[in-house]
Amino acid sequence: MNNEKWNEICFLLSDNVRSDISESDFEQQVVQALRVLDWKEYLGDIEIRPSFQVGSVNKITPDFVIKSSDNRKLFVIEIKQPNIPLNSRFQQQLFSYMRQLKLEYGILIGQAIQIFYDGNLAKQDDPILLETIKFTKDNDKGVKFVELFSKANFNQDSLREFTLNGLKKLNRREEHKELTKKLLDESYQEKLSELIKQDFLDEYDGELIESVLENLKVEIKAKNPLPAQSELPKREFYKTRIVDYSNGILPIELNPPTESEFKRRLLNTKTAYITTFYKNGTSKQKVWNAHRFRETSGVLGNLRSRPEFRNGKWQELGIEKVYVSIEK
């Protein structure tokens, strides 16, 4: 049954969707997909583009908010045209809605379905991507999505179990990376000769083993090494960049300027510097202690989730822009 429902969702959100479909037309397809999961607008299960007051002058308008029979908000959905790749900017928009509405789960729908979690089970600052589900028929992940997010089955215990399993997989990947890093570190490779010596001491004397090892190179190498990431020239860090202030989003400038490069360096340094510029001409700098920042974290999502940088609050505080750099 769940498999059949998932295949119907694939038909509605992928197979039967034109490549040039507008977001408003895609919205109607999503409404139909939600009906497959038994969420119905006429019963009050779905709010489409509801408006919520944030602060004294600002509002947020998520695409969908799914509610329980007693009118509690359960999760929020943000949609994007399926011909546009899902990116960090779309994720940050969803994160903002999750934080403002105090919801643990958010779903991004476009070329695929992404499920995000923002709650106490995760020990990091910004929401975590638990799963990405492609629109392929008979997809086990899709069947699980139907099981979790259909109206009849929706409950916190199942979601908690799903979340814990997802976090366990993420942690396992992190541990794998950490152990790999330790084994490839020069300090560990220096121990290899000593380990070899200990292994052969029952057969040969130590002096002979050391003599042989002096003529050998012993090292551990990754079978499939990642391509080296080149450092950006320092002049690129300070290149003047034009920031658009007209779109209602707090301008945040990174140094290094690309999020991927900034993230790579932040994972190494675990420290960055946040300078906040105010409309009255003043500025303040503080240290970002990023010891909880992980490979799965998002830089801009993390920054925008800070209380002072949330939509409505930064305008209230008179913030003009934010500059975040690895170097002081």
Image: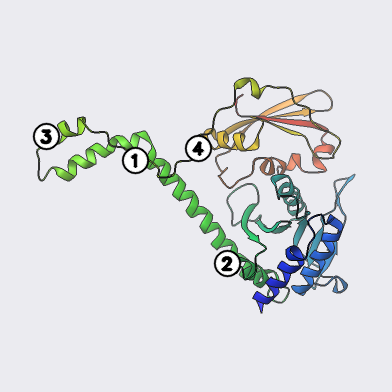
Q: Residues within 10 Å of mark 1 (few under 14, many from 20)?
A: few
How far apart are labels 4 and 2 at the CA level?
A: 36 Å
Residue that appears at 56% across and 36% down: 264
Please state if 266 lies on the left or on the right of 181 as rendered: right
Closer to the N terminus: mark 3 or mark 4? 3
User: What residue would you read off at disc 1?
Assistant: 220
Q: Secondary structure at mark 1?
A: loop
How far apart are labels 3 and 2 at the CA level?
A: 57 Å
Closer to the N terminus: mark 4 or mark 1? 1
Q: Amino acid at mark 4?
A: Pro
User: How many circles with numbers are drawn on the protein?
Assistant: 4
User: What residue would you read off at disc 2?
Assistant: 161
How far apart are labels 3 and 4 at the CA level?
A: 39 Å
Q: Secondary structure at mark 2?
A: helix
On residue 208, the disc is 3
Please state if 210 lies on the left or on the right of 298 as rendered: left
User: What residue would you read off at disc 4?
Assistant: 227
